């Protein structure tokens, strides 16, 4: 139930759900059924996995949006790769996922009788294994993209927003500035946070503090309310460093006049004057213009994962998750999107394509065209891709087997 402004999605190796996507813009996407095979340790192969059968052990569903920059290459690779990385990671911990409590040793070996107690004291749950699988899959996919782009002599990166429905829970993993929200009759709940140079300022500044050579003596890691000028020398001005959430004053030195590590604010904030996001996939070859300063050391490929327990929600037929690239959220707030969802779905209950049509209507709302449902004529000049995921059907099939 996803669309973009034009074209069609295509993804080899994944069973495709109704979707449309352009192959010519920098947004890419994938969706389908996620099939996880059962694996166990063999009697003689202590450390080797054996696939016992090709039958599905667990099944879930997968949705992913990739917003490319510097060209579509990284986003295309991610759309064709990340689901396979995730499937491998989930198959590797399959037995742990179906256990009442994740075992200390996946092989079933008991080295210490107190192992279950240690696991319990750490608060390790089954969902933590899925979170770890998502984090590892993002990292693996990032490494694949780095190798493939280098081999092809290509460059680029992308943000990644993924939702996985598995065993009655929805896992939302985000690395970048796309967004997912839960919309219910009386609730709007963010399911992701955007990762930008501003939102991760302290992490980025801390890295520059520990490894100052990353700035090549061309940038200052300190943040000031504006770019300092020569006339500021010797004056006490507002600043903050990596250890500060608040502000203080310092006497301006010559080194403070360098270009800031993070400059601008809001949607205009840039890392090293170049990139508007602080997490994502790819960008291994990205450098500051006319320098050899790399951005990759400051970027994380690891997502933040939010877990939504569908069994705790008393789901209604019109409860949905809206996933979209930043082009939608540049124009519409969470509340505006929720109003559009609530106004559209109740009147179209008999339409089997209503969730796809809702996604199309959300995109139409960003184009500033006459008759736009928001009535505000707002225009997004970015690529826009949207998934609308109906949760009622996911909750109905919550066993996952």
Image (cartoon, grey):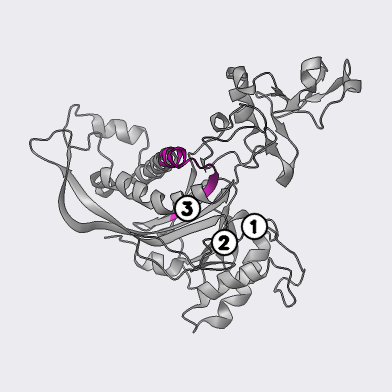
Residue annotated with mark 1: 327
Mark 3 or mark 2, which has the lower sequence index? 3
* Furthest residue toward bottom: 350
Question: Which residue occupies 91% across, 22% down?
Answer: 231
Residue annotated with mark 2: 385
Q: Is residue 100 visible?
A: no
Residue 14's image quarter? bottom left
Q: Position of residue 336 (x, y in %)?
A: 68, 64
Under circle 2, the secondary element is: strand
* Furthest residue toward left: 44
Residue situated in front as seen by the camera: 155 or 225: 155
Res 76 label: 3
Under circle 1, the secondary element is: helix
Is residue 151 rendered magenta in the image?
A: yes
Question: Which residue occupies 54% across, 47% down?
Answer: 159
Is residue 393 rendered magenta in the image?
A: no
Number of residues whose C-alpha sits closer than 10 Å to that of mark 2, classed few (under 14), some (14–19) or many (20 or more): many
Q: Is residue 90 left or right of residue 53?
A: right
Mark 3 or mark 1, which has the lower sequence index? 3
In this picture, is 188 found above or below 121? below
Mark 1 or mark 2, which has the lower sequence index? 1
Q: Position of residue 203 (x, y in %)?
A: 60, 29
Q: Position of residue 74 (x, y in %)?
A: 50, 47
In this picture, is 348 found above or below 311? below
């Amino acid at each position: 139930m996803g669309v973009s402004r034009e074209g069609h999605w295509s993804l080899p190796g994944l069973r495709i759900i109704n979707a449309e996507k352009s192959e010519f813009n920098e947004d890419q996407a994938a969706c389908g059924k996620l099939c996880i095979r059962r694996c166990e340790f063999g009697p003689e192969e202590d450390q080797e996995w054996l696939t016992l059968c090709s039958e599905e052990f667990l099944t879930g569903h997968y949705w992913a949006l990739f917003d490319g920059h510097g060209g579509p290459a990284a986003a295309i690779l991610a759309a064709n790769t990340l689901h396979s990385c995730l499937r491998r990671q989930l198959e590797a911990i399959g037995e742990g996922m179906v256990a009442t409590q994740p075992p200390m040793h996946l092989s079933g070996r008991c080295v210490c009788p107190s192992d279950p107690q240690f696991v319990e004291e750490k608060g390790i749950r089954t969902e933590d294994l899925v979170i770890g699988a998502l984090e590892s899959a993002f990292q693996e996919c990032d490494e694949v993209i780095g190798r493939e782009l280098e081999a092809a002599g290509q460059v680029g990166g992308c943000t990644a927003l993924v939702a996985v429905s598995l065993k009655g829970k929805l896992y939302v993993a985000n690395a970048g500035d796309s967004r997912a929200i839960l919309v219910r009759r009386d609730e709007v709940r963010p399911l992701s946070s955007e990762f930008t140079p501003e939102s991760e300022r302290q992490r980025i500044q801390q890295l520059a503090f520990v490894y100052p050579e990353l700035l090549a003596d061309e940038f200052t890691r300190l943040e000031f309310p504006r770019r300092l000028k020569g006339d500021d020398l010797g004056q006490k001005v507002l600043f903050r460093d990596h250890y500060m959430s608040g502000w203080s004053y310092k006497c301006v030195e010559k080194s403070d006049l360098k270009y800031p590590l993070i400059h601008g604010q809001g949607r205009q904030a840039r890392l090293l004057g170049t990139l508007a996001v602080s997490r994502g996939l790819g960008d291994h070859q990205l450098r500051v213009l006319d320098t050899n300063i790399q951005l990759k050391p400051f970027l994380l490929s690891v997502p933040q994962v939010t877990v939504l327990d569908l069994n705790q929600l008393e789901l209604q037929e019109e409860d949905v998750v809206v996933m979209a690239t930043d082009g939608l959220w540049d124009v519409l707030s969470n509340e505006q999107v929720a109003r559009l969802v609530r106004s559209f779905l109740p009147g179209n209950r008999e339409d089997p394509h209503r969730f796809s049509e809702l996604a199309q209507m959300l995109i139409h709302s960003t184009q500033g065209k006459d008759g736009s449902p928001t009535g505000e004529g707002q225009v997004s000049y970015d690529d826009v891709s949207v998934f609308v995921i109906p949760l009622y059907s996911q909750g109905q099939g919550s066993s996952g087997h």
